[in-house]
Amino acid sequence: MDSSMYLYDVPPVLMEKFCKIIDSGDDSLGWRGLAARIVPSWTEVRRTERLEAIGKSPTRELIWSWAQQNKTVGDLVKVLEDMGHYRALQFFIPQETQHSFPNSGPSKSSRDNPSPPQLKCFHSVARRHRGN
């Protein structure tokens, strides 16, 4: 997925899957960990808690609000890398880089095609989290 794509242009089906993953996470890998990195105030976190209490997806509400600031897929990838949330990152990075995630091996396409330069930062972050 293009890192310059605005979050409000991400296909709804993909965003729904992403929200379910984050909503099901605990603490630093859940919506509160995401909120700690993207919301401007604790008032916004409290508002999100109230929305969750009435059955709305807290992640969807956070992302929608954040997207209104013209945030991009690249911005979200940086936040997810900071969180160390590799499962959620898989929705937004090219398939050939998924071998960088812990517990997954390189695919044939990733061995045959070198990674684009813009992904070098991601690879270094992934290696650091794996301990290499």
Image: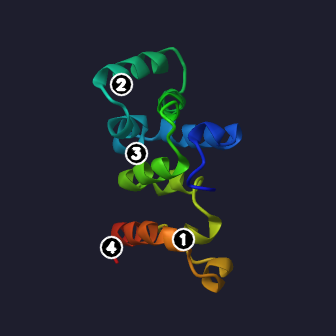
Looking at the image, tell me whether mark 1 or mark 4 is earlier in sequence order. 1
**Mark 4 residue type:** Gly
Residue at the spot 32% in from the left edge and 73% down from the top edge: 131
Neighbour class for label 1 at 10 Å: few (<14), some, many (≥20)?
few
Neighbour class for label 4 at 10 Å: few (<14), some, many (≥20)?
few
Local secondary structure at mark 4? loop
Q: Which residue is mark 2?
A: 45
Residue at the spot 48% in from the left edge and 53% down from the top edge: 77
Nearer to us: label 2 or label 1: 2
Nearer to us: label 2 or label 4: 2
Q: Is residue 71 above or below residue 86?
A: above
Q: Which residue is mark 1?
A: 104
Image coordinates for residue 132, horizontal then vertical, percent: 34, 78
Q: Quadrant of the N terminus?
A: bottom right
Say which mark, if any, is on residue 29: 3
Residue at the spot 45% in from the left edge and 72% down from the top edge: 120
Looking at the image, tell me whether mark 1 or mark 3 is earlier in sequence order. 3
